[in-house]
Amino acid sequence: MAGSDKTEKATPKRREESRRKGQVAKSADLNGAIVLLAGLFTLAATGGSIVDHCKDAMHRMLALGADAPDVVERASIGGIILGVLQDIGLSVAPVAAACALAGIAANVAQVRFRITPEALKPDPRKLNPVSGFKQIFGPNALVEGAKSVTKVAVVGAIVLAGLLPALPELGTLVGMSPDELGAQLADTVLGIAKRAALAYLLIGVADYFWQKHKLEKSMRMDKQEIKEEHKGQSLPSEVRAAQRRRAMQLSRARMMAAVPEADVVVTNPTHFSVALKYGDGMLAPEVVAKGQDLTALKIREIAHEHGVPVLPNPPLARGLFASVEVGQAIPEEFFHAVAQVLAFVYRTADRRSAAA
């Protein structure tokens, strides 16, 4: 229901925030099609030079076989290999350079040139096996699978349509010299490849607009969000900063007040602290407080003052800190680990009660 209320287009501020996080509309198919076309056209333009360089490399190697006893005296093996590699490098350099430049230009044209360090930060939530399972077997995977099948079918049909009419002509190539045969085959293959690449380009353009539509849909806002954003922008920057500081202080105070009510505090043991509570009516344990460094130390101090158990469990503490916000229930992948912690806490409390 909440998603159905987001009917308004994203504001410039929301777009800038999304871009800063690396959320941009980009089609990998469009990049691939442009790189493929650049490589094919460069290959067609420099095919003669490539053949000449390959001839030079082959002649050099055949000459070694014809004059093997004198090879070591005239040149070292390293120099021979370097010469062959140079011929190969000169033959592929134009195609490689064209593909690299085309790839850079395609990316810049889609997302503009801007470095977003925030998008490069590691995100522990991407390692969540449940999320990965949903991506592999969820609705999005079905859509992507259908797109891949469609792409292969369309490109394959175009290649087949270009290849079948050319089959009868192949019989007429018998008796041609190697140079003529190579040129004829290269012309036929390049022609079919260019038509397939152009079809792939159209698919890439369509995919780019689809990605842009998905991004626009994900950035939609509801009317209340737009009101809050305009309200915040109408205030001076100093007032907005003071409001943010005040809100953070109030939120931190509420969070610290909830620590004495927690059942357990899981620690890193020094860098992170996460307070958990599980009571009647709760479907799953909830994170009532969490913090890092000094805030983590304060949570542990309050827990010790009020007799809340503090248990070191670095993997669980790091995972909960990175994946769960304060006031949220823990996700399914943490159920087993948290259940073990709570069971230990309850058993310890029962033993203490019995001893008393």
Image (cartoon, grey):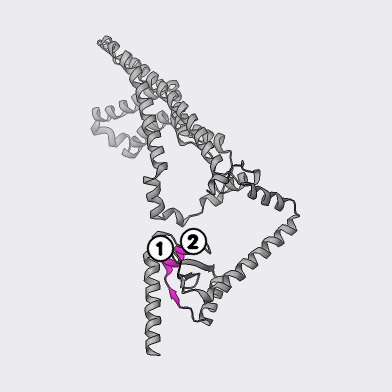
Circle 2 residue:
324
Specify the segment rendered in magenta. Answer: 308-320
- Give, as a three-letter code, the residue at label 1: Phe
Q: Is residue 337 magenta?
A: no
325 vs 87, left or right, is: right
Residue 329 location (% of width, % of height): 47, 62
Quarter of the rendering containing residue 96: top left
In the picture shown, does residue 86 fall above or below 315?
Answer: above
Q: Is residue 322 above or below residue 87?
A: below
* Viewport quadrant of the C terminus: bottom left
Front-lying residue, 115 or 287: 287
Label 1 secondary element:
helix
Tell me, yes or no, if residue 42 can be seen here.
yes
Residue at x-position 47% and y-position 26%: 202
Of all residues shown, which one is farthest toward the right? 236
Q: Position of residue 54 (x, y in %)?
A: 35, 26
Q: Residue type at mark 2: give it.
A: Val
Kindly report the distance in space between the C-alpha atoms of the residues bearing marks 2 and 1: 10 Å
Q: Residue sitting at 61 percent across and 42 percent down?
A: 8
Mark 2 and mark 1 residues within 8 Å of each other at the beta carbon: yes
Specify the farthest residue to the front: 281
Q: Quadrant of residue 218?
A: top right
